[in-house]
Image (tube, rainbow, N blue to C red):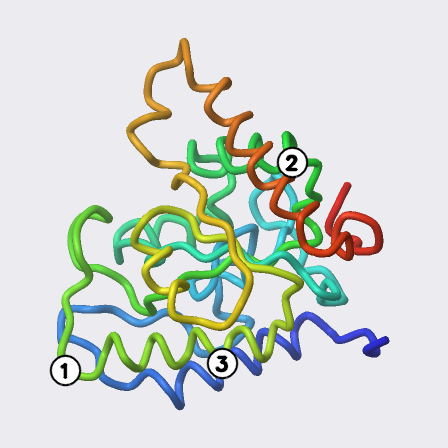
Amino acid sequence: MNPARKSAEVVDELLRAMANVVTSYHPTVGRTSSTVEGLIQGTSFFPGGAGLWRGRQSGGVLPEYFPPGPLMFVGHNFDSQRNYDISLARGGEVEGQFWTRLLRILEAARVAPEACFFTNALMGLKPGKAEGAVPSVPGYKEECQEFLKRQIEIVQPCALVALGSDATRHLRHLKSRYVALKHPSNWDFRPLATRDVLLLAEGRKLREFLNSIDGRVAHSSPVLA
């Protein structure tokens, strides 16, 4: 069994690797902090935050130890510069609809958020609105893909979860087990009358995926609540 790892040390390793691997940013794409202390101090996806569950309240404490063999959730890109600044000032992003829906999926799958790592495939911050493609330059996407591989090496997840079709495209070429779920911001979840039914279906899909991994995750991993 691997020895317990300090969360701050693992996140710092991720930040250093990101700085070394991803260097070709479009001039309009902003950067997140290069230090653990400068990240969003609350629950938030990496690279804007530490990528770890820090509770439902703003300003949650970074857990002392990094979860062993976490379930690694991969989104497409973090957010816009504007929304990042808001979350940075607020101390987290867990109060929004995205997290409300994601937590419902986790609850339905009986997955503990404390045993997960939440990250993105593309680094940097979009200019303007959060929707749409991240401005790119030659080499950027390739470097982000290389860093995604490095993230997996550092995080040492038990399995991967792609949130949305864009994230799925990034994971499709990797030699890692993954399941593709709908992104929590998907339009399918907009109608209130059917939202919970669809979220529960995504949770069941995740649970079935975990159960299918040779029984190892389902019976021995701390991922399941």
Q: Which residue is mark 2?
A: 109
Residue at the (68%, 70%) spot, across then down: 7
Quarter of the image containing the C terminus? top right
First along the sequence among labels 1 and 3:
1
In the image, residue 58 sits, relative to residue 124, either above or below, namely above
- The crowding category of the residue bearing disc 2, from other C-alpha atoms within 10 Å (few below 14, some 14 to 19, many at least 20), is many
Q: Residue at x 65, y 36 (%)?
A: 109
**Discs 1/2, front:** 2
Along the viewing direction, whichever of 159 and 191 lies nearer the viewer: 159
Judging by the rendered image, the residue that carries numbered circle 3 is 150
Closer to the camera in the image, 175 or 50: 175
| Label 2 to label 3: alpha-carbon separation | 27 Å
* Percent of width and height locating residue 75: 40, 54
Residue type for callout 2: Ala
Q: Earlier in the sequence, mark 1 or mark 2?
A: 2
Which quadrant of the figure has residue 25? bottom left
Tag shown at residue 138: 1
Residue 150 left/right relative to 55: left
Which labelled disc corresponds to residue 12?
none
Q: Position of residue 85 (x, y in %)?
A: 34, 55
Q: Secondary structure at mark 3?
A: helix
> Which picture quadrant has residue 11?
bottom right
In terms of secondary structure, where does tag 1 sit?
loop
Farthest bottom residue in view: 20
Which quadrant is the N terminus positioned in? Answer: bottom right
